[in-house]
Amino acid sequence: MNTLISNVSQLVTPRGDAPVNGSSMSDISVQERVSIRIEDGVIVDIAERVDKNGIDVLIDAGDAVVMPGLVDPHTHAVFAATREEEFLARLQGKPYDEGGIQSSARAVAAASEKDLVQTATPWLQRMIESGTTTVEIKSGYGLSLEGETKLLLAIRQMRKTLPMRVVPTFLGAHAFPGGVRRDDYISTIITDMIPTVRRRRLAQFCDVFCDKGFFTPSETRTILRAARGAGLDLKLHADELANVGGAELAADLGATSADHLLRVDEHGMRRLREAGVIPVLLPGTAFTLGAEYAPARRMIDLDLPVALATDFNPGTCLIYSMWIIISLAVMRMQMTIEEALTAATLNSAAALELADKIGSIEVGKRADMILLDLDSYRQIPYFFGHNPVRMVLRDGKVIHERSRPHKRGASRPS
């Protein structure tokens, strides 16, 4: 199927098929009054005038701002129950610990795979409506072979039924289940869970929560070496609650990304840069926890390719909108809007090993893109909490369209 998108007021995109480092993150392309030709889901031409012969679908952008579909490379979007009581208690001073994860694990144990799919699907549909075309989803609320398998099978089912791209990650090492010795649980992860994930092809990545009160760097190294031996790509929850050397470990292991990094130090940042590890920052979690934000400005100044994600989960961040994350990055982490857009598209795609396919609007890339009811992309952080998305395309096909577009001007974002 051949599609033409015409009457684009602004086409805004980073460029390239690899993560963009440091100051280059601000070097985005802004083209005005262009059209986009798509053939079989791939972008084949971008120009003021493109060949209209053989077009099957014509989309009038109506002077919309067009940019790549948003990529969310860190979520825990499959869970069985919300945790609002924990949230409210934490606001009254209760510290964050692994008890909340245990609560989610009990809820998952009592739920069926069908229950998990039915609970998660509306959240993911809201993500699509907010312009997210690719999402990573972790397991981690199972804390047993049966529970983790159930979660990964639910994620697989959503990969088949939802129109967005879904990237699965195995996070059996999220916390330690109650009543089980640490060494015994780590042995279960290595001898039972990872082989099952590999045999059934349930995940692309393996992640470990490497932090104070969770998995030590030594335990993390043991688990991730086993995962790499099984052919899984590596990620780390690193240095969120304390600086335990998670960034250095991610660098040593050649992980694709190190995520959170609220407590990372200068040495850890430099090691990430030397090893080519992408820092995935989650300002929504810092916002919800009332914590200090990750040092994004220093990372960019050190020439790191910063990415952004929601960390959507039932305990510490129920934010599913990447627009809020982009705004927080600009308002609280001293990132420019251009840097934040690169971080939420091309660099976040690179954090999922997908930068050669998605994350920018360029000839040869998959046609994942969104049409926004804005006068300029620079309005995005200004309209904090608003959803400017009019239309969402994945592989050139419309997967969401707002039924009643807003009028142009100050009232446009919704």
Image (cartoon, grey):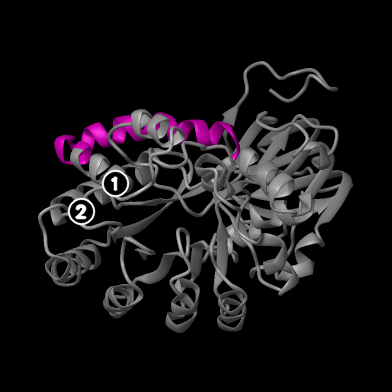
Residue 261 position within the rendered picture, expressed as x and y whole percent measured from the top left: 53, 63
Say which residue label 1 marks. Answer: 101
Q: Earlier in the sequence, mark 2 or mark 1?
A: 1
Q: Quadrant of the N terminus?
A: top right
Residue placed most toward the observer, 243 or 78: 243
Q: On the rendered image, what quadrant is the C terminus found in?
A: top right
Q: Residue at x 70, y 67 (%)?
A: 298
Mark 2 = which residue? 143
Q: Is residue 112 magenta?
A: yes
**What percent of the width, then of the height, locates residue 401?**
61, 27
2 and 1 marks in contact (CB < 8 Å): yes
Residue lying at 60% horizontally and 58% vertically, measured from the top left: 294
> Residue at the spot x=73%, y=44% of the render?
331
Residues in magenta, as a range: 107-131
Element marked by disc 1? helix
Residue drawn at x 24%, y 67% as measured from the top left: 198
Q: How many marks?
A: 2
Q: Is residue 400 above or below residue 299?
A: above
